[in-house]
Structures are given as structure tokens and as C-alpha cells.
């Protein structure tokens, strides 16, 4: 979908979306349309329950005196609470209101909102961003979908008096959306299409943006001693890969230690010998969600030319049961030299991350390392599908991530770590075991990962198992893969690590 910006004008055809504040207060364009329609919009509001509250909408079809085919009144809520996220939600809801009308273009009117926390150009840019995010569809495998079941809108016009400033503000947001869409695509792909080798190939497409890519195969990983990652992969016919992505966006500080992002990339997780129940196992195609976020984030950073040195590392495996699969009770040696007793082969993500995290620190010496993984069902029990679980060894970065999450609508909630939890993963025959028992499963998983964090490295683990996939629509996040984490981490970098 093409996004464009124009000066204010009343449309002569097609649908137009206008804003209405709480209490039914029409914004400027809505007032002009209401006057041209001899009060038809006001009468429609009086005859309905529409009061301009956030999330409400009312469509008036072909009002007399107006060239537009329909006028969509979109509730904005209270002016004092109207900010970036509210503007994005406005754009997302506006797009959805007109997407299936049969029209090829539509206008979203952006008017000044007195008392709002955001200026008009920011409203326009963020509304465009929200509409773009809402327009995502993964439909490449639908061969018989009828034309009238597909969105018809090809061009969306944001009409405002600050159109030039809005266009400039939108440009980096569009690049972030590219990263979000890339992640959503990767997470949505079926496992017979997306497996370690093909996912690595997708990561390599970032080279055209200036990202430096290195791909390690199983022989190279074996030479490095990555026994944990390779142990997970050994039951599958699909060969594992480790992908490193480097973005050197701070040219004046090329040798400056980077910030690092590490992602779990289990392209399909049967559980291995500790096999999962059949019901819902199809969802395990997105057990590579952490790696998808890291790849999408690197695309966003490179796309908007972020002034930061960043490294992304993703460990890519498929976890399958076979005659060559890892067994419960096996002991593996990680790249760090530490040994692990594998009591449950379905606790595989932490094994992949252990080697990926160690390699990242050993080779690139990051000052900060953030790992992302659809790691545990226990985090969903704790936090549901609303927050990612956050574990860390540093208070400041937790505060930064919490603030970034609030500002982009991707909230995180800090969970505890401690010696008492750490003791639960001590093994009788190895340095540690890969599970800690029934209780506190997301915490003991994080404790396991912390054993692979080097002294002096600020570290955060984000368990995104509950937020990687959504079974319902939200204003800017369609049902399906969410790409939760791309916007969060991009905002973290923008706020604290660029320059």
C-alpha cells in the first residue's frame, strides 16, 4: 500500500476518515463536512451511541452535499490522552474501516487536536505508520481467495496542514515497519518452507542494506565446541546454522563495543524425544520467533541508518525425534566448557541460546546483550499474552526497556532472579541440568541462561512466548505473527545507544 501526504482538502470521491473527540466534538475537517452535508454527521451521531470515545466509529454513507462516498467518524477519546500510540491506533482503525470498501484510495484527515501530547505533523506521521502496520497480510498461500475478500485500498492519503513535516517524520517509521513486516513474514512461514538453511538465506538478504552477514555451518560449530546447539539439531535432517549480522552504523566509533541481540531460532519444535502433545503442535512453526525479531530489528536499524554498532546472532535448528535425536539424560558440553545434563529435550531453546550467547560475547565483546526467545509456556501462565517476561542483571536497562515498551505498545514485565532459583538447576552429574522442576519454569530457564553471561556484560532475557503470536486483531497488529520486540528494541536503541 502506498502512503502519501497532502494539504487539507475535502475529497471529491472515495471514503474519508475524520476524527471526533470525546463528547462528540468534531475536529476541523469533520466540521466542514458536516456543514457541507447540512448537519448530516451531527444527526447521525445523535441517532447513535457514538460519542467520540477511543475505539468507536460511525460510518455515514454518501451524505448529500459531500463528494466522498462515505464519511467514517473515528473516535479519538480525550484530547489530553492523545499521543503517538493513540495516533497510530487512529491510523490502524481508519485503514481497517475503509480497506474493504471497494475503493482504491482513501483519505485520513489529520486536524490539530488542542491539548494533545503530539503536534499535528506527528499525528499524521504516526497515523500513517499505524495504518501501514495494520495493512499487513500473510496471504501468499491463498490461491482461491475472491477479489472482494481482499483489501481494495492501494493508496492512503494523509491530509494535513503540515504534510511536508509529516512526510519527513514518517520516513524512518516506514523503515521500522519494513522490519516488522519481515519478522511477521518469517514467523508466519510454515516449517517445510522455513528451516535453518532457508532462514539463514533470508537473513542474508540484509546484505543489500549494508549489514555484514556470516553464516556458520555444523562443521564450523562443531570445531567451536557448540555441543548444546548441535545436540538439539542432531535428530533432524535439516542442518543447523548460526547467523551473525553486523551493522556498523557509528562510523566515528567503528571499534566501539556493540550492543548485541541474540535470538532463539527453532524453526520447528516437536519437543524431540520428550515429544509435545499433538494438539497445537502446529504453532511450533513460530518457535523461531526470537530469531525473527532479531533479523527484523537488524533490517529496521539498517533501513533507517541507525547511528549504532549492533550485532545480531541467531542460532537456527529444528528439534525432531529420530534414531539420532538427543535423549533425556544425555550430557553435552557447551562452547563455554560448561556441561549440561539434558533431562528434557523439549527445554531446547536454552541450549541453543547458551552457545549463541557465548559465541556472541567471545567474538564481539558487546557492552550489552539482549536475548529473545519463545522460551517457556510458564511465562504465559505468569503474564498471559499481554507482557513479555523480562529478566536482567542490570536495573538501568530494565527501566529503559520498560519505558520503551510503554512508548511503543510492547510492554515488558520484570521477573525475579536469585541464588535460590539458580540452585534448582544444579545437576548431580554435570555442571547444570536444563530444567529446574515444575515451579518457576520461566525463572529457572533464565537462571540457566545467566550462567552463560560473562562478567561485566549487561544482560537482558526477554521471554516472548506469550506475545509472539496473537489470535485476535489489534488496531496496528493483525491476527497472527506480531513481531513483538522489533519496535521495542528499535526504540531502546534510538533512545539510549545512538550517536
Image (cartoon, helix red, strand yellow):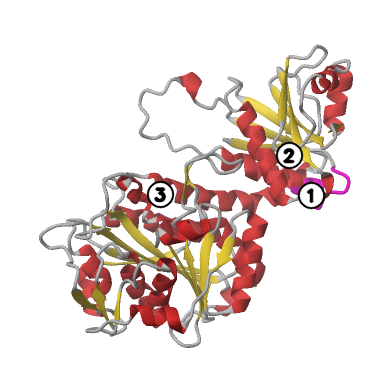
Q: Residue at (29%, 55%) from the top-left corner? A: 269
Visible residue check, residue 451: no
Q: Residues within 10 Å of mark 2 (few under 14, many from 20)?
A: some
Q: Quadrant of the C terminus?
A: bottom right
Instruction: Tell me which numbered mark, 3 or 2, is placed earlier along the sequence.
Output: 2
Query: Left or right: where does residue 257 sit relative to residue 114?
Result: left
Q: In the rendered image, which residue does mark 2 sit on?
A: 54
**Where's residue 53, x and y in %?**
76, 37
Label 3 CA crowd tier, 10 Å (few <14, some 14–19, many 20+): many
Q: Is residue 121 magenta?
A: yes
How far apart marks 1 and 2 lie (CA) works out to 10 Å
User: Cβ–Cβ below 8 Å for labels 1 and 2?
Assistant: yes
Q: Which mark is residue 187?
A: 3
Q: Position of residue 195 (x, y in %)?
A: 28, 53
Among the two numbered marks 1 and 3 on one chain, the one whose residue lies closer to the N terminus? 1
Residue 81, label in figure? 1
Q: CA distance from mark 1 to mark 3?
A: 33 Å
- In what element is the residue under mark 2? loop
- Residue at image x 27%, y 50%? 277
Mark 1 crowd level (few <14, some 14–19, many ≥20, 10 Å Cα): some
Over which residues does the magenta segment extend? Answer: 113-122
Amino acid at each position: 500500500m502506498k502512503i502519501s501526504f497532502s494539504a487539507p482538502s475535502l475529497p471529491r470521491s472515495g471514503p474519508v476518515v475524520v476524527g471526533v473527540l470525546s463528547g462528540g466534538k468534531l475536529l476541523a475537517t469533520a466540521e466542514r463536512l458536516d456543514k457541507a452535508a447540512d448537519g448530516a454527521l451531527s444527526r447521525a451521531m445523535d441517532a447513535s451511541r457514538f460519542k467520540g470515545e477511543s475505539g468507536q466509529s460511525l460510518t455515514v454513507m454518501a451524505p448529500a452535499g459531500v463528494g466522498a462516498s462515505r464519511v467514517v467518524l473515528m473516535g479519538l477519546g480525550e484530547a489530553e490522552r492523545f499521543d503517538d500510540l493513540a495516533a497510530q491506533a487512529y491510523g490502524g482503525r481508519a485503514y481497517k474501516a475503509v480497506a474493504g470498501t471497494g475503493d482504491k484510495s482513501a483519505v485520513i484527515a489529520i486536524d490539530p487536536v488542542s491539548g494533545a501530547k503530539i503536534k499535528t505533523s506527528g499525528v499524521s506521521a504516526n497515523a500513517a505508520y499505524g495504518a501501514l502496520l495494520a495493512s499487513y497480510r500473510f496471504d501468499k498461500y491463498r490461491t482461491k481467495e475472491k477479489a472482494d475478500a481482499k483489501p481494495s485500498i492501494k493508496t492512503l492519503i494523509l491530509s494535513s496542514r503540515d504534510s511536508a513535516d509529516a512526510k519527513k517524520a514518517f520516513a524512518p517509521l516506514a523503515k521500522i515497519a519494513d522490519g516488522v513486516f519481515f519478522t511477521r513474514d518469517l514467523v508466519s512461514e510454515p516449517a517445510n518452507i522455513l528451516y535453518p538453511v532457508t532462514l539463514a538465506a533470508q537473513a542474508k538478504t540484509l546484505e543489500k542494506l549494508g549489514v555484514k552477514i556470516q553464516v556458520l555451518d555444523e562443521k564450523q560449530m562443531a570445531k567451536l565446541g557448540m555441543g548444546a546447539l548441535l545436540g538439539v539439531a542432531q535428530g533432524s535432517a535439516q542442518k543447523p546454522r548460526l547467523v551473525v549480522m553486523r551493522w556498523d552504523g557509528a562510523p566515528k566509533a567503528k571499534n566501539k563495543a556493540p550492543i548485541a541481540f541474540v535470538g532463539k531460532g527453532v524453526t520447528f519444535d516437536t519437543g524431540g524425544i520428550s515429544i509435545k502433545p499433538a494438539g497445537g503442535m502446529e504453532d511450533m512453526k513460530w518457535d523461531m520467533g526470537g530469531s525473527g525479531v532479531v533479523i527484523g530489528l537488524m533490517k529496521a536499524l539498517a533501513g533507517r541508518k541507525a547511528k549504532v554498532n549492533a550485532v545480531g546472532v541467531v542460532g537456527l535448528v529444528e528439534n525432531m525425534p529420530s534414531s539420532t535425536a538427543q535423549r533425556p539424560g544425555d550430557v553435552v558440553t557447551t562452547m563455554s566448557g560448561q556441561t549440561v545434563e539434558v533431562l528434557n529435550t523439549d527445554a531446547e531453546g536454552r541450549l541453543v541460546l547458551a552457545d549463541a550467547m557465548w559465541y556472541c560475547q567471545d567474538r564481539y565483546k558487546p557492552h550489552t546483550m539482549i536475548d529473545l526467545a519463545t522460551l517457556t509456556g510458564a511465562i504465559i501462565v505468569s503474564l498471559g499474552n499481554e507482557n513479555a517476561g523480562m529478566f536482567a542483571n542490570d536495573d538501568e536497562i530494565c527501566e529503559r526497556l520498560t519505558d520503551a515498551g510503554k512508548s511503543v505498545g510492547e510492554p515488558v514485565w520484570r521477573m525475579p532472579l536469585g541464588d535460590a532459583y539458580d540452585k534448582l538447576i544444579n545437576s548431580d552429574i554435570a555442571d547444570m541440568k536444563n530444567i529446574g522442576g515444575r515451579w518457576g519454569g520461566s525463572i529457572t530457564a533464565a537462571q540457566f541462561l545467566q550462567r552463560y553471561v560473562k562478567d561485566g556484560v549487561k544482560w537482558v532475557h526477554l521471554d516472548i512466548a506469550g506475545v509472539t503470536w496473537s489470535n485476535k486483531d489489534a488496531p496496528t497488529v493483525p491476527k497472527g505473527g506480531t513481531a513483538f520486540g522489533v519496535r521495542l528494541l528499535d526504540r531502546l536503541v534510538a533512545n539510549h545507544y545512538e550517536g
